[in-house]
């Protein structure tokens, strides 16, 4: 049976001060966000989006983690796309939409003459009606139903957890990493134009923020499948779309873009589902004979699926759409409609993300959603089927490394490697480096005084680290005639590990060749050869050669 309920998310929009700095300099300015009439300094931390595997069409696009300087417990995500700011901020029990920022001087002068007040959306504007489907098909009424899904690239390890104690142990505030496959259609691309990939990242970033702050759960985006949503049938009939998603996944027809069929699969569409009915979002969720213990968990069964349509207009479309997506994924986790569904009537029907009616003060998930989370996660027999585990590996270049060197000279460099994992996990890392320019070569690479492997003509090194913690890498290199550029990277060798802060996983280091300090070139080359520093004639010929070759429903209503 499908229950149809409605919810309204009334945006609490922070009015923000206009700004005039360029995209290249704003990160270096003090930026202010106007909250409840007060301009508050905003701290921005760049976020690495390399793991999305997407290169934004506009090179000025940037993504940030944010918080208010005087309120470090506030958390948010912001993006600068198409010359506009957007984002979400959780502060003081409320969810704020970011729509503009201001540099320091402008904020102070404007604040002296204007009163800035947080504004909300029109009270009649609703994200729509959302009702979830606790039954997916007759086949899914028992845990054995997941056997109809054919595993791909998966090795079960039979790990079962107790969420309440398990999540006392975190890495950078994360205890579990849910595997999420996101699918988009050509209508989504049309809605957002050339920036559609950046907007998709923004939606995902906001969903990740909500779950990480509330439940210590981040998401590993297994795939961002653009255009693949076109293969789902059903047109604008949202129930038919979800049914087709189920049928195709069970049949293996999603194999080309669905790397783990046990992951959460969510389809974000530009279709207008509201044309065919009241729904703009739908998802499958578990049934309950006695809440909060599910009859069987939907997560890791292969049936954690849902779809949402793009909602809203302007720069806030991504933030509003992310609220719908977070709501629908919540049903996959076993969350019910607050204040409406049996078992959760004690929670407000209008104050939280899973409420039937969301008001401007909606801020995250209710205690009823929290109550459902642990039983649903604890009931998963093989949680590694659809969850990864957080780590944080970093590589830092020593500040004493040389920036300049004479051609043909020998230089020594040093690096610090730090690795953090859950106390119940062993973290094994692989550290690699590649000289990407010039004919320079590696003489040696040592990790904690132990030699590493050199290959590719001594232009690459590889170090394997078992039970990683804190380590030191030392390199000895011989420069050539051109500047030396070397890329270093550290990564886990375990496919179940997920680095929650990948910004410091790799670094490109450049050592410039300084001819001014070399004196007479020919004399120096000869003296190098005489001193046995690598064979000057061979080294010179190599450089010359290089130079030559070189089921939840959401109904949208218009504002009155």
Image: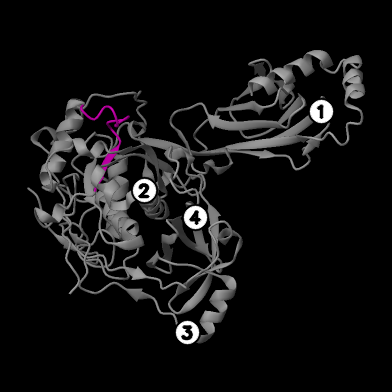
Q: Is residue 255 magenta?
A: yes
Sequence-wise, the earlier of marks 1 and 3 is 3
Residue at the spot 30% in from the left edge and 71% down from the top edge: 360
Q: Residue furthest front?
A: 548
Pointers 1 and 3 in contact (C-beta within 8 Å): no
Mark 1 or mark 3, whichever is nearer to me: 1
- For disc 2, the marked residue is 194
Category of crowding for the residue at label 2, using alpha-carbon neighbours closer than 10 angstroms: few (below 14), some (14–19), many (at least 20) = some
CA distance for labels 2 and 3: 36 Å
Q: Quadrant of the C terminus?
A: bottom left
Q: Of callouts 3 and 4, which one flags the residue occurring earlier in the amino acid sequence?
A: 4
Relative horizontal placement of residue 294, taking residue 92 as reference (left or right): left
Closer-to-camera residue (256/452): 256
Few, some or many C-alpha atoms within 10 Å of disc 3 (few <14, some 14-19, many ≥20)?
A: few
Magenta stretch, main secondary structure class:
loop
**Residue on which disc 3 sits:** 114
Residue 360 forms part of the magenta stretch: no
Q: Mark 1 to mark 4: distance in Å?
A: 42 Å
- Residue 22: x percent and y percent? 54, 61
Q: Mark 1 = which residue?
A: 407
Element marked by disc 1: loop
**Residue 255 position (above or below residue 192):** above
Residue bounds of the magenta highlight: 253-269
Marked residue nearer the N-terminal end (2 or 3): 3
Q: What kind of element bears circle 4? A: strand
Q: Nearer the viewer, residue 277 or 315?
A: 315
């Amino acid at each position: 049976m499908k229950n149809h309920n409605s919810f309204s998310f009334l945006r609490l929009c922070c009015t923000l001060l206009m700004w005039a700095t360029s995209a290249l300099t704003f990160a270096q300015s003090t930026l202010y966000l106007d909250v409840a009439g007060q301009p508050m300094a905003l701290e921005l931390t760049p976020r690495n989006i390399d793991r999305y595997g997407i290169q934004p069409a506009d090179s000025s696009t940037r993504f940030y983690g944010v918080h208010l300087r005087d309120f470090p417990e506030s958390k948010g995500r912001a993006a600068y796309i198409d010359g506009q700011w957007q984002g979400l901020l959780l502060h003081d029990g409320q969810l704020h939409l970011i729509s503009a920022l201001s540099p320091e001087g402008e904020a102070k002068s404007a604040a002296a003459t204007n009163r800035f007040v947080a504004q909300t959306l029109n009270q009649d504007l609703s994200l729509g009606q959302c009702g979830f489907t606790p039954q997916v098909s007759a086949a899914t009424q028992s845990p054995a139903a997941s056997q109809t899904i054919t595993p791909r690239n998966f090795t079960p390890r039979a790990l079962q957890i107790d969420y309440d104690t398990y999540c006392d142990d975190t890495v950078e505030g994360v205890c579990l990493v849910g595997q999420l496959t996101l699918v988009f259609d050509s209508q989504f691309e049309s809605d957002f134009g050339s920036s559609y990939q950046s907007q998709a990242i923004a939606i995902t970033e906001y969903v990740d923020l909500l779950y990480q702050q509330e439940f210590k759960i981040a998401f590993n985006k297994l795939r961002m499948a653009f255009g693949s949503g076109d293969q789902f049938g059903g047109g604008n009939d949202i129930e038919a779309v979800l049914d087709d998603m189920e049928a195709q996944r069970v049949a293996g027809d999603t194999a080309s873009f669905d790397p783990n069929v046990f992951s959460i699969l969510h389809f974000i569409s530009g279709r207008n589902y509201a044309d065919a009915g009241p729904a703009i979002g739908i998802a499958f969720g578990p049934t309950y004979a006695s809440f909060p213990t599910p009859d069987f968990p939907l997560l890791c069964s292969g049936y954690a699926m849902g779809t949402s349509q793009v909602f809203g207009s302007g720069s806030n479309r991504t933030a509003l759409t992310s609220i719908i997506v977070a709501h629908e994924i919540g049903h996959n986790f076993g969350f019910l409609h607050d204040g409406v569904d049996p078992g959760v009537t004690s929670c407000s029907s209008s104050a939280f993300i899973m409420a039937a009616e969301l008001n401007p003060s909606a801020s995250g998930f209710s205690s009823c959603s929290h109550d459902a989370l642990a039983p649903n996660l604890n009931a998963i027999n093989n949680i590694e089927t659809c969850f990864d585990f957080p780590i944080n590996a970093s590589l830092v270049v020593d500040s004493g490394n040389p920036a300049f060197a004479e051609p043909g000279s020998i230089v020594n460099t040093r690096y610090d490697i730090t690795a953090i994992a859950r106390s119940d996990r062993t973290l094994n890392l692989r550290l690699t480096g590649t000289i990407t320019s010039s004919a320079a070569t590696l003489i040696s690479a040592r990790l904690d005084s132990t030699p590493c492997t050199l290959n590719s003509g001594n232009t690459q090194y590889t170090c394997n680290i078992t039970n990683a913690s804190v380590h030191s890498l030392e390199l000895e290199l011989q420069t050539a005639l051109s500047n030396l550029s070397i890329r270093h990277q550290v990564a886990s060798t375990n496919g179940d590990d997920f680095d929650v802060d990948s910004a410091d996983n790799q670094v490109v280091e450049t050592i410039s060749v300084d001819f001014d300090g070399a004196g007479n070139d020919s004399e120096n080359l000869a003296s190098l050869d005489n001193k046995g520093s690598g064979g000057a004639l061979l080294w010179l010929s190599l450089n010359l050669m290089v130079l030559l070759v070189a089921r939840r429903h959401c109904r949208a209503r218009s504002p009155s």
